[in-house]
Amino acid sequence: MLHGLSGTTTSGRSGTRSSDHREPNCAKKAQRPELHGALNLANTESFGFLLTPTRLANDKGQPFLAPSCELPGDSSQLTQVTLVWQKGWREDWLKFGKPVASLIVDRRQRKEFYSAGQVFGLVCWAANDFGTVRSSLHIVRAVCAGEAVIPVPQVDPGGDLLLSAFGWPKVARVFRLIDAIEASGIDPCDVAPDHWRHIHNRLAARETPRSYSPARHRAWLQRKALTR
């Protein structure tokens, strides 16, 4: 399956990847990114831009924006997520999320922006010459300015951390729970935040989380409507 700059695919709800939860493959030493010069070729990793280090901005010196995306006027009120993609060495992607804007920084780095209240799932994977060194999944709710935040790697200024999973077996288990939610016709972006906290606590206690039913989701939406 082909991946974009951030590692996300175009198929699936909210830009999720496929249901294949195999861990990414580590690159061989001969494939280390720093051993290769820039390729003057366009591919899915570059979003159609030439893979050269000199064209990181347009003629006005402004960073490239992803197609059909523009940064809002006051981007300081948004939560910024940095995604890096170096296949076989560092692969970050969104399991789910609906950014209000996207910014291509260069051929390997992308930034996505979320408004207060939006929920997203950030997956980070990294490896070295000897194998995987990091596998994590953070489900985060973007917060309002002045609201208390929890520091989350690659998320600025942080957010309301609903769930954290470390190690590929635990990450893959959460993936399967997310797939079950999507199979019931519910967008993970709209799931009650308390359910993600419930999953986090149950997994930490080595217990089986409760399923998230359509009836419970309707109850959450009704409660949410009353608090507006």
Image (cartoon, rainbow, N blue to C red):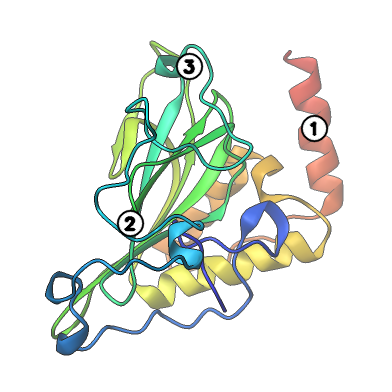
For the question of whether residue 193 can be seen, the reply is yes
Tag nearer the camera, 1 or 2: 2
Quadrant in which the C terminus is drawn: top right
Amino acid type indicated by mark 3: Cys
Dot 1, crowdedness within 10 Å: few (<14), some or many (≥20)? few
User: Mark 2 or 3 closer to N-term?
Assistant: 2
Tag nearer the camera, 3 or 1: 3
Q: For residue 49, which quarter of the picture?
A: bottom left
Using the image as rendered, state which of residue 87 and residue 143 is in the foreground. 87
Determine which residue is flagged by label 1.
Answer: 221
114 is higher (above) or lower (below) than 55: above
Tag nearer the camera, 2 or 3: 2
Q: Residue at x 56, y 48 (%)?
A: 196
Determine which residue is flagged by label 3.
Answer: 144
For the question of whether residue 197 can be seen, the reply is no
Say which mark, if any, is on residue 108.
2
Give the Cα separation between the discs numbered 1 and 2.
38 Å
197 is higher (above) or lower (below) than 23: above
Give the Cα separation between the discs numbered 2 and 3.
29 Å
User: Mark 1 or 2 closer to N-term?
Assistant: 2
Q: Residue at x 24, y 53 (%)?
A: 53
Using the image as rendered, state which of residue 25 and residue 86 is in the foreground. 86
